[in-house]
Amino acid sequence: MDEKVDSFLKVHEVFYPSAETMEKAWIRDYDKAYAESIKDIPGFWERAAHELEWFSTWSQVLKWNYPWAEWFVGATCNITHNCLDRHLKTWRKNKVALIWVGEDDSERIFSYAELYRKVCRCANALKALGIRKGDRVAIYLPKIPEQTVAMLACARIGAIHTVVYSGFSAPALASRIEDSQPRAIITADVGYDRGKVVPLKPVVDEAVAHSPCIEKVVVVRRQKPGITLSSPKEIDWDDWLKEQKALCAPEVMNAEDPLYFLYTSGTTGKPKAVQHVHGGYMVGTYLTTKLVFDLKDEDVYFCVADPGWVTGHSYIVYGPLLNGATILMVEGKPDYPTPGRWWDLIERYGVTIFYTTPTAIRLLMKYGEEWPVKYDLSSLRILGSVGEPINPEAWLWFHRATGGKLPIMDTWWQTETGAILITPLPCTKLKPGSAARPFLGIEADVVDREGKPLPPNTGGFAVIKTPWPSMMRTIYKDPDRYKVYWNTIPGCYTAGDVCRKDEDGYFFFMGRADDVIKVAGNRIGTAEVESALVSHPAVAEAAVIGKPHKTAGEAIKAFIILKQGFKETPEFIDQIKDHVKHELGKIAVPHEVEIVPSLPKTRSGKIMRRVLKAKELGQNPGDISTLED
Ligand code: PRX
């Protein structure tokens, strides 16, 4: 995309936090706190790190060998010590850590002490399989407490978890397994989706058949009677944990030791394993959860994400547990069994902080304000949004539907950044559609391709100018791909987002600058979908673009060229969609597929998606001098 993108979005309304919100907030004066934090960035993060417990301290806060960062150099810690053990020494021991509500409304509640015991049992069970520090463990689970337990148990023994979203298909799971070479996989028999049973075990069976590295498959059996476990590799989760002791000392980790890999899509067909570490990630997720959501001990915190994605890692599991929060975790969709589902849960559990997504807000908006008004939402005090730009209309609806007084934290960040980087705080002025300004200790800007700052209201690239503790450390097995983030624009980390800043320094994100499509906030690479399409025997070539979609933000449109001898039949498009579903999973299935005789290409043969998109949207395609035909 061209660096100069003019934006015509005008904000008419601004909102100020209420006196009550201000009075209670951890941070009451953003400008002052920000100026102070930026004067000495390592010093700022060091003060935050001192709020947590370390087994031994650091010799240096930041070692910056561009583009490689080490934070809390030489320190030792274990993130689970701060998520669990630290609270067990206080009254929080019997505080509710996790309330889980299943799609069928079943409820499971864990205190901090109970969660600790479960995690220790699971950690010991992993050890009993011979899994050690540095080994990888794949987690392919629906949103159930075992997912959280498994992640923490891996971290406890220093194994690296790699969670794969349970909507991904067998080939997508297998390719992630092949890349990270886990020794075990933890899965479940089924998930549930709008009342339908979604079998997961067959997906794992298919993936494991191609994955010789997998020595054991642990299965959480949710259905009664339990499915039969047929291979000697397979173990039932309950049997696995039953004999284990509820005490397991945390492995002493170097602050820079890897905590997890999480795969995300980029511009190539191969997903990248973003690597996060114990120390810096812990400090970043701890502080952002505390300050952005103004988290206090009395809060009931509800984040709708799935730990299959980064938001669930940072803001369901690690950030809230590091703060000793009470977390509400809910399986299922916002409109099942009724569009009042989430509003009902907010009333039922007295939720005070509600972190959701623009796609979910737009979906609920379609059902109208008559749903939220049926429920008592007076417990709510802070709202959040993440994953894609929130359009002012959806922002204003969310604000109105929850009573018209609550501040919305439109949080901008990425899998790679580990934690929120650009965001309002509960004390800042809010502009619908804007993620406001950089978080404390973060230097961000909007620049052109050369890295030159742009004047207000000029579209350019969002960049981060200095390292931060929760930044990814590398792409597993592909350091060159990591370097691209810091080499594309001189001297800066490039996020891949197009953005403008207004005269107040407020960031307005306008979408991706690269070939990444955001469908319902999920990141999908055009190249991945294209390679799934061309793996169908009838497809010769394919090109994929993102098109604006009223609810999902963007939808995928695919253009395909058929191989000679293949004819379009009435069922053909459905077959193609099924094929993509099998290759990648439901989330990557194109909304529209159009058969075309040719695709716009450069003289060197690169498909010009930009031209396809402009044509599809009836826009000017810009410079087409490199177009072959
Ligand atoms: O394009 C931005 C968009 O989501 C991308 C990161 O996607 P992912 O790594 O999947 O992480 C999603 C959850 C953090 C960004 O490059 N994005 C995320 N939050 C926002 C956003 N775009 C606009 N406004 C946001 N608040």
Image (cartoon, rainbow, N blue to C red):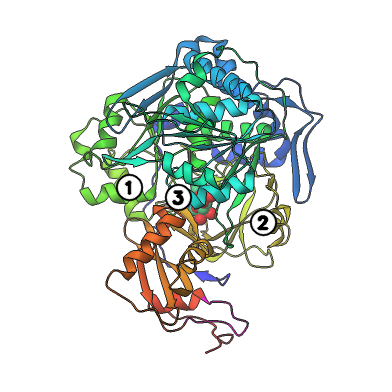
Q: State the separation of the CA atoms marked 3 and 1.
A: 27 Å
Who comes first in sequence, dot 3 or dot 1?
Answer: 3
Query: Which image quarter: residue 494?
Result: bottom right
Which residue carries the number 1 mark?
361
Which residue carries the number 3 mark?
169
Q: Are marks 3 and 1 in contact (CB under 8 Å)?
A: no
At label 1, counting other C-alpha atoms closer than 10 Å, the crowd grade (few under 14, some 14-19, many 20 or more) is some
Label 2 element class = helix
The residue lying at 82 percent from left, 29 percent from top is 59
User: Which stretch appears magenta?
Assistant: 599-608
Who comes first in sequence, dot 2 or dot 1?
Answer: 1
Using the image, tell me which numbered label, if any, was put on residue 153: none
Query: Which image quarter: residue 160?
Result: top right
Percent across and percent down for residue 502 are: 51, 59
Q: State the separation of the CA atoms marked 3 and 2.
A: 28 Å
Query: Which image quarter: residue 229?
Result: top left
Using the image, tell me which numbered label, if any, was put on residue 485: 2
Residue 27 visible from this viewpoint: no
Q: Are marks 3 and 2 in contact (CB under 8 Å)?
A: no
Check the image and report above or below for 216 versus 452.
above
Percent across and percent down for residue 329 are: 39, 31
At label 2, counting other C-alpha atoms closer than 10 Å, the crowd grade (few under 14, some 14-19, many 20 or more) is some
Q: What is the magenta segment's predominant secondary structure?
A: loop
Per the image, is 604 magenta? yes
In front: 595, or 207? 207
- Disc 2 CB within 8 Å of nearest ligand 1 atom: no
Is 21 left, or right, of 361 in this rendering?
right
Q: State the separation of the CA atoms marked 2 and 1.
A: 31 Å
The residue most toward the bottom is: 629
Percent across and percent down for residue 215 are: 60, 34
Amino acid marked by disc 2: Tyr
Check the image and report above or below for 485 versus 623.
above
